[in-house]
């Protein structure tokens, strides 16, 4: 059975782009240097660890980097931001069909 041996660079860039947007737009943006250090550390990690890491919801990571617990309002803003900036392929198709 084939295995996934690495994280797609395009997907990783999208992930970190969303984390950066959440840190800046939802949590005030003061923690992007911590994010940059973590991004480098993850990039240098073995592929299996990277795959596990990228299952972390970007909102959760941004909250941890910011040292904050997201409010209901911040969660709603995150969902709107995520869906606007990085819609799932099925959502793009729906929008095009209607």
Image (spheres, grey):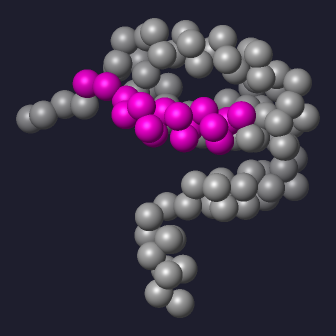
- The quadrant the N terminus occupies is top left
Residue drawn at 67 percent across, 36 percent down: 19
Q: Left or right of 29: which side holds 52?
A: left
Asked if one can make out residue 74 in the rendered structure from this viewpoint, the answer is: yes
Picture layout, residue 33 above or below residue 57? above
Residue drawn at 59 percent across, 19 percent down: 39
- Magenta highlight on residue 9: yes
Residue 93 rendering spot, x and y as whole percentages = 45, 76
Residue 40 rendering spot, x and y as whole percentages = 56, 13
User: In the figure, residue 83 lies in which quadrant?
Assistant: bottom right
Closer to us: 36 or 54: 36
Asked if one can make out residue 69 in the rendered structure from this viewpoint, the answer is: no
Residue 9 rendering spot, x and y as whole percentages = 42, 31
Residue at far left of view:
1
Residue drawn at 46 percent across, 9 percent down: 44
Residue at far bottom of view:
98
Residue 96 rendering spot, x and y as whole percentages = 50, 81
Q: Which residues are magenta?
A: 5-20
């Amino acid at each position: 059975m084939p295995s996934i041996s690495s994280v797609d660079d395009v997907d990783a860039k999208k992930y970190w782009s969303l984390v950066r947007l959440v840190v800046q737009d939802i949590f005030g943006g003061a923690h992007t240097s911590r994010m940059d250090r973590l991004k480098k550390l993850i990039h240098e990690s073995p592929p299996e660890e990277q795959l596990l890491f990228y299952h972390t919801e970007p909102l959760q990571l941004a909250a941890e980097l910011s040292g904050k617990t997201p409010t209901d309002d911040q969660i709603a803003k995150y969902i709107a931001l995520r869906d606007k900036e990085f819609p799932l392929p099925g959502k793009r198709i729906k929008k095009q069909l209607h």
